[in-house]
Amino acid sequence: MSSALLSKVKQTETKNRQFNEDGKYGIVQYNDIQDDEEVDPRTIELMNTVIQEQNPDLVIINGDMLNADLDTADEVKQAIDTIAKPMEENKVNWAVTQQ
């Protein structure tokens, strides 16, 4: 697991999630990204667009985040860091589920 991801997990574990002042809590979910260390730029662009348009309180990445073409730990780290970038740059809390 990348150090940025571990840092984010530790930060969010100590925070309480609350509804917004309007009584809402927005969640965006991305399913089965299934990418490798060279994440398709269109995927990142779409993720950024959705986050900026929806302004969610939480992003959930569900299902298969990476495909089986990753051969090294560095490739896995690069893929995870790239996929995490839209949430990190937009300062949105996020989580990954694993089945």
Image (cartoon, rainbow, N blue to C red):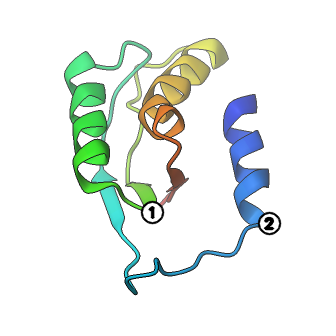
The residue sitting at 41% across, 41% down in the picture is: 65
Q: What residue sits 63% from the left and 13% below the top?
A: 74
Q: Position of residue 56 (x, y in %)?
A: 37, 59
Residue 27 or residue 22, whichever sits in front: 22
**Is 51 or 10 nearer to us in this picture?**
51
Q: Where does residue 35 sit, x and y in percent of width and height?
A: 34, 27
Pointer 2 local density, CA inside 10 Å: few below 14, some 14–19, many at least 20? few
Quadrant containing the N terminus in the rendered view: top right
- What residue type is disc 2 on? Thr
* Horizontal and vertical percent position of residue 76: 56, 23
* Kind of residue indicated by mark 1: Asp
Looking at the picture, tell me which residue is in the foreground, 55 or 75: 55
Q: Name the residue under label 2.
A: 14
The residue sitting at the front extreme is 21
Rendered view: 34 above or below 82? below
Question: What residue appears at the point 30 percent right and 35 percent down from the top-left corner?
Answer: 48
Residue at which label 1 appears: 57
Which mark, residue 15? none
Upstream in sequence: badge 1 or badge 2 = 2
Few, some or many C-alpha atoms within 10 Å of disc 1 (few <14, some 14-19, many ≥20)?
some
Do we see residue 12 in this rendering? yes
Give the image location of residue 13, x and y in percent. 75, 64
Q: In this view, does 59 lie to the left or right of 91?
A: left
Q: Which residue lies furthest to the bottom in this view?
A: 23
Q: Is mark 1 on a helix, strand or loop?
A: loop
